Image: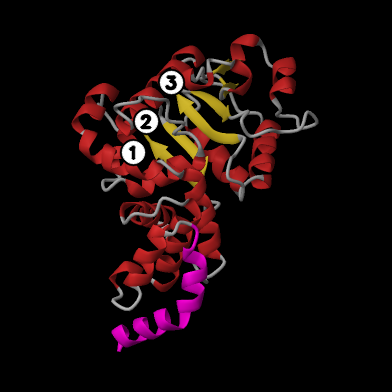
Amino acid sequence: MLVHQLSNALNEDQANCYRYLLVDPLKPVKIVEPLALENIKDVFSSDEFKAILRPDLSYEPTICPHLILLAKPGEVLEPELLDLTVTRIEKERSHYKHYICAWISSELDIQNLAEMMIDLGLQLGRLLSPKQPTFLPFYEHIRLQLLKESLSVESLLSGLFNFIHRYTYMNYYGQLIQIKAADNLLTKDFLLSSQIFLQNALQYQNEPKATFGLVKMWQDNIQTLPPNALFLSAKKLLDAKNIGFTNLEDRLVYALYCLIYQVDLITIETISPHILAAILAPGSLKKRLEQLENDIKASINQNNN
C-alpha cells in the first residue's frame, strides 16, 4: 500500500522533476543494509548523491544528511529501489529518528536543492533562536510533523517548501504526508512576512526528544491519540516550564498528568499548592502526584458534574 501510494506520487512528477531520497546518517544503519551510505556510494555515481552540509555539525559529510538521486526528469523510478526505501522506513516508523527522512520531487538539480535545504534550515534556526542562530533540522520527521501541527495556517508549511514540487515523509503516526509547494512565493519574502506565525510555531521545537517520549507515554494511557498529539504534548511541556519547573522529569510528569486528565493541574485549587511546592523541590513531583491521584480524579469529577 505504501509503495503504491509513494510510487504514484513520485511518478506523477516524472516529466519535469528530479526525484530524490533524503537520508540522515545520524540514525545509524548496519553496513548490511543496501541503503547504507557506504553501499550507496559504491553503487551510485558521485553526482547522484550529495551531502547537505550542516554548519552545526562542522560540515562533516559522514554525519550530515544526504540527497540521493532516484530518477531524473523523464526517467521512471526503479520499483525495487522504492521497495527498499519503504521496507527501511517501516522498520523504523516507531523510532525517534528515521534514516529515511523524505522522498522529494523538485525541478532543482542536486547541488541547488542541497543549497536550498541548507538555507531553509539556517533561516528557521535564526527564527528559533535569534540570539544564538543555529541550523534547524526541519527534515527530521518529529520536527516536521510538530511544525505542521503547530502552524495555525496550513499554507504556511507549503510556503516553506516553495523550492520543491512535492515533499513526502512518514509522520509520527505512521502516515505518509505530502507537502506541495505553494505557488509564486519566494522563500526569503515568505519567511519575512510570516515571521510572527513561524516564531510562534518554532517555540515548540526546543525539546523534540522529550516531546516524542511524552507522546509515547500518553499513548500508553489513552485509546486513541488526537491528530495533533505532538503539538499538544509540546505545548504542555512548555506550560510546565513557564510555571516554573526546571527539572525535565517534573515537566514530563506534569505534562503527562495534564494530558491524561485533560486539565491544567495548576488550576485545581486543592492541587495547586502541591504543584508550587514541587517546583521548589525539583524531582519530587512524581511522588507527590501519585499520592494525590485520587484527589485529582475527585476534583475533575466534581467539575464535570
The spot of residue 96 in percent (x, y) is 58, 45
Q: Amino acid at mark 2?
A: Phe
Q: Which residue is mark 1?
A: 157
Tell me, yes or no, if residue 212 can be seen here.
Answer: yes
Q: Quick one: label 1, few (<14), some, or many (20+) residues within 10 Å?
A: many
Q: Which residue is located at x 57 percent, y 66 percent?
A: 220
Give the total of numbered labels.
Answer: 3
SS assignment at label 1 = helix
Residues under numbered marks 3 and 1 in contact, where contact means CB atoms less than 8 Å apart: no
Q: Which residue is located at x 71 percent, y 33 percent?
A: 29
Q: Is residue 106 magenta?
A: no
Most common SS among magenta residues: helix
* Separation (CA) of disc 3 from disc 2: 12 Å
Display coloring:
secondary structure
Question: Which circle, 3 or 1, is nearer the viewer?
Answer: 3
Q: Which residue is mark 3?
A: 118
The spot of residue 173 in percent (x, y) is 52, 54
SS assignment at label 3 = helix
Instruction: Please say if 277 is above or below 242.
Output: below
* Separation (CA) of disc 2 from disc 1: 7 Å
The spot of residue 97 in percent (x, y) is 58, 40
Q: Which residue is located at x 50 percent, y 66 percent?
A: 286
Q: Is residue 294 magenta?
A: yes
Q: Which residue is mark 2?
A: 161
Displayed quadrant of residue 21: top right
Magenta stretch? 283-305
Residues under numbered marks 2 and 1 in contact, where contact means CB atoms less than 8 Å apart: yes
Q: Amino acid at mark 3?
A: Ile
Instruction: Please say if 99 is above or below 171.
Output: above
